[in-house]
Amino acid sequence: DSGVTQTPKHLITATGQRVTLRCSPRSGDLSVYWYQQSLDQGLQFLIQYYNGEERAKGNILERFSAQQFPDLHSELNLSSLELGDSALYFCASSPSGFSSYNSPLHFGNGTRLTVT
Amino acid sequence: TQLLEQSPQFLSIQEGENLTVYCNSSSVFSSLQWYRQEPGEGPVLLVTVVTGGEVKKLKRLTFQFGDARKDSSLHITAAQPGDTGLYLCAGARNDYKLSFGAGTTVTVRA
């Protein structure tokens, strides 16, 4: 058990809809990272928050947004969903703002999103 | 285009055989991490290598970081069915952002 909790585990929705994925980091970790994993793209970094502030942005679409709340949990909002958004979405946490050798990532078990 | 290229993409071997997975890049990394991901779960960190030429052993797994810190390999000796999974390498550059390879799916047949 990594200590990172993601809900829901599965989500099925229709094109054009909006969904919210939730992540609770490990106790004591200040950084939350969101990743998208699909068969053809691998694990793609979307966005990172550190102690409530956006820290780094990756390949995140404008239709997607995220935030980190004062209690450090994070939400990833996906809107105007398309078929191609179907993927596994992972949240990871780390103690510091840097994903380096002394601050590795701990991943949750992901949310499987299916857009029909 | 992936910053880190992993090969092979798929590997299927018999229990007891050895295997090597490669992770290559044209970029220099300050550190490189290896993760294993099993179906229905998130990636789990196996090891972090930091120094060029570094070799780390984790039971039957041997990890090596290239001298120039651009590549790495993972060698498994006498593979077991429990080694089955997706192996991911991830490199941290000076900007500390972590980039993942596409992964190698390893299947060990009993």
Image (tube, rainbow, N blue to C red):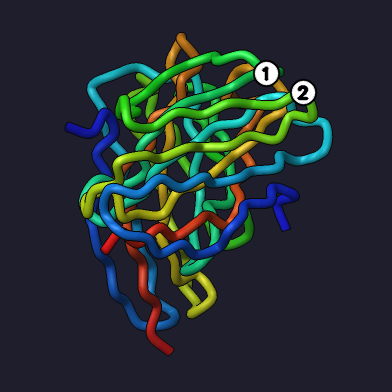
Residue furthest right as drawn: A28
Q: In the rendered image, is residue B33 in sight?
A: yes
Tags 2 and 1 touching, CB below 8 Å: yes
Viewer-side residue, A97 vs B27: A97
Mark 2 is on which residue type?
A: Pro
**Residue B92, above or below B84:** above
Element under disc 1: loop
**Residue A97, above or below A87:** above
Viewer-side residue, A52 vs B48: A52
Mark 1 is on which residue type?
A: Gly
**Residue A47, above or below B73:** above
In the displayed structure image, the side of residue B105 where residue A103 appears, left or right: right
Q: Residues within 10 Å of mark 1 (few under 14, many from 20)?
A: some
Q: Residue placed at 30% from the left, 41% from the top?
A: A80
Q: In the rendered image, is residue B57 in sight?
A: no
| Picture quarter with the C terminus of chain A | bottom left
Where is residue B86? Give x, y as percent: 40, 60
Element under disc 2: loop
* Of callouts 2 and 1, the N-terminal one: 1
| Picture quarter with the N terminus of chain A | bottom right
**Residue that numbered label 2 is attached to:** A70
Q: Picture quarter containing residue A51?
A: top right
Where is residue B65? Give x, y as percent: 44, 32
**Residue that numbered label 1 is attached to:** A52
Q: Residue placed at 61% from the left, 55% from the top?
A: A7
Q: Residue placed at 52% from the left, 31% from the top?
A: B54
Q: Residue placed at 54% from the left, 75% from the top?
A: B82
The CA distance from mark 2 to mark 1 is 6 Å
The chain carrying label 2 is: A
